[in-house]
Image (cartoon, coloured by chain):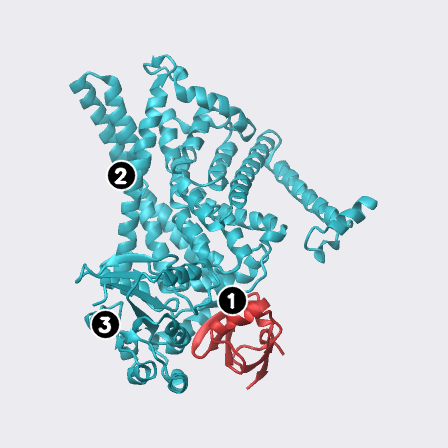
Amino acid sequence: MFKNLCLIGTPNCGKTTLYNALTGSFETVGNRVGVTVEEKSGKLKKRPEITVTDLPGLYSLSADSEDEKAVLTFLDKKKFDAVIYVMDGTNPIKGLSLLTEITKLSVPTVVAVNFCDELEKSGIEFDDKILSDAFNVPVVKISARKGKNLDALISAALNKAVPIKFDAEKVKAVKSAFLRAKPVGKTKSEILTEKIDKVLLSKLWGFPIMFAVCFIMFFLTLNVGGRIGTVIGGAIDNASDKLYVYLSGKTGGVWFADLISHAVVGGVGNVLGFLPQIIFLFFFLTALEQTGYTSRMAFLTDEILNKIGLCGKSVFSFGLSCGCAVSGVSAASGIEEKSARETTVYLTSFMPCGAKTAVFSYLCGKIFGGNAFLAASFYLVGIFMVCIGGAILSRFKRFKATGGFVMEMPTLRLPSVRVLYGAARDKTADFLLKAGSIIFAVSVILWLLKNFGFSGYTGGDIEKSFVYAAGNVLKYAFYPLGFGNWQATVSLLSGIFAKEAVIESLSAVTEDPASLFSTAYSAYGFMVFVLVSPPCVAALAAAKRELKSRKLFWGMAVFQFLTGYLIALVINVFGIIALNIGKIAAIVLTLTAALTIICLKNTLISGKCGDCKKCRTVKASCRRRERAG
Amino acid sequence: MTLFNVKVGKKVTVSGYTLSAYYRKKLAKFGITDNCVITVLGVSPFGGTQKVSVNGVNFAVGKKISEGIIVKYV
């Protein structure tokens, strides 16, 4: 009897849904190509002695993208006894070619034909007998989503699976039979998808619908999620004050009461107040992925993204980055083109993740009167920064996209309640774990650094503390940005561990965050710096894995830091001019400076202003001509 | 005529390529091979990316790829 099963199939055929149903897991499922980027293993629910491994989808055994290469590496190691080949029953032709190639593995195989619930609903009969005759393996019709016939599948996989021996003539006959059946045998979902796509992908409605969907998603997250978070945050603040009074009375030790109530409960609690926003965000992102709409977003944006060195599939990374930068960076492994993949990794953390959104909400609440629109504006800033960053990187040969975009467009489906619940549950657990570990550690360390100095316990005199000494040295770097003080510097440093730690640090070192900034513009610049500068260590580690090059990784970190610094500097200078001379003058000066830079760039490249349209790269010959005059 | 020039709703067959071997192999994985029938179902708002159907499976194909597939009307 086989003890190790693995799930193989083309992308988006239901492997992960089947894996979740068999093992009781809640792995991420999305209705698009490239959701699963690495192997995952789990125990069969009803037979824990049997292991099932879910693999990323692939179209053939010759790999293009990193996730396809990961599958081939797994298959080479032969750490499995039998294969469950998952086939999309609504598009069986898609999986025939890979099924033929699986023969090379010479491993016992059983074919699972998925989505049979949809076929039944549409009154379409799937001829499993001709498939079974052609490949000489058992074929089982299942519905992974509804959990139908899974026992029969496992029984066939464990007891009846045999290596494939296909008959080429019979396979040709199978393909012809499926091709003949396809136009008539379209499911209701496919017919409905074609009608809906006429609107979703149209010239008139395509982009407005996309912007409306994104706006609704982020507005509900920040507004509704934000209001619930404010209530939770207020309750935790009250609880930490009462705890302080109780502990200082009980123990008599003020410093102990301060550590537990304000540093631990208050500090961690500040971050927990943003949990509703995180849950809302992941709920909406998962729902969007489940429906298949993200593939439509990739279709709409591919041509624009090409102009800045990216491709349509980069949209998946940017979307996921709005939840967590680690997921966004990991999703880049599904992009086959190396230059587009590297550019995506460089730029994906410019999108505000859940943690950064929490920082913006906190500061907008403390400085800008809780303006939800201002907090939401950072999504637009993120998109703007991706465009600017992409335009800069695409000047370099390494990051130039070649534009070879081909992607399957899946049928639109309703989100699964089970998967949505699983996503919200997993993200809550991740967030609580992070709050309970990294944020807790940062809270305690910060409290110690704030209350102890070179002369020991400071008794509340902050200017004698370690944190003041460290921040005082590094603050000079941030003077030009309008927040050259030790408090803002220390909070930025703590953001390296987790961006939520910026909130905890700011609340630990000051009662009034607004006092840390010379103007409202420099406060906004601070938030833009948090947005654009290098992300947390977890996202940096994911980026290093994807880039596979130390030089590229450090290049990315320096690029992000310098971009964040320059933008924050521009915002601060704009603010100084606006406040001293006037807003109109500031706008005019900024536009003049931008146009001057663009014209200078054209002159440097081609020697003449206006010739830049034909010349897309900085050629050595152009520079030599320019120097020769 | 290339696939890029085909209007929405029309059916064509593939008669050749001007693409590199890398892209031809990639297209073959998706079932886009010589003499296969492609139906153009839609085009992006900027007119570059096309939505096509090959053997009942729908794909998005970028401009650079579709300009490299030579086709003729069925």
- Chain under numbered label 2: A
Sequence-first tag of 1 and 3: 3
Along the line of sight, the residue nearer the viewer: A385 or A165 = A165
Q: Residue A571: percent from the left, percent from the top? A: 56, 36
- Chain under numbered label 1: A
Q: Amino acid at mark 1?
A: Leu
Q: Quadrant of residue A569?
A: top right
Instruction: State the SS at label 3.
Output: helix
Sequence-first tag of 1 and 2: 1
- Image quarter where the C terminus of chain A lies is top right
Q: Amino acid at mark 3?
A: Leu
Q: Residue A582: percent from the left, percent from the top? A: 60, 34
Q: Colour of chain B?
A: red
Along the line of sight, the residue nearer the viewer: A99 or A436 = A99
**Point 35% across, 26% down: residue:** A446
Q: Mark on residue A204?
A: 1
Q: Mark on residue A153?
A: 3
- Chain under numbered label 3: A
Q: Colour of chain A?
A: cyan
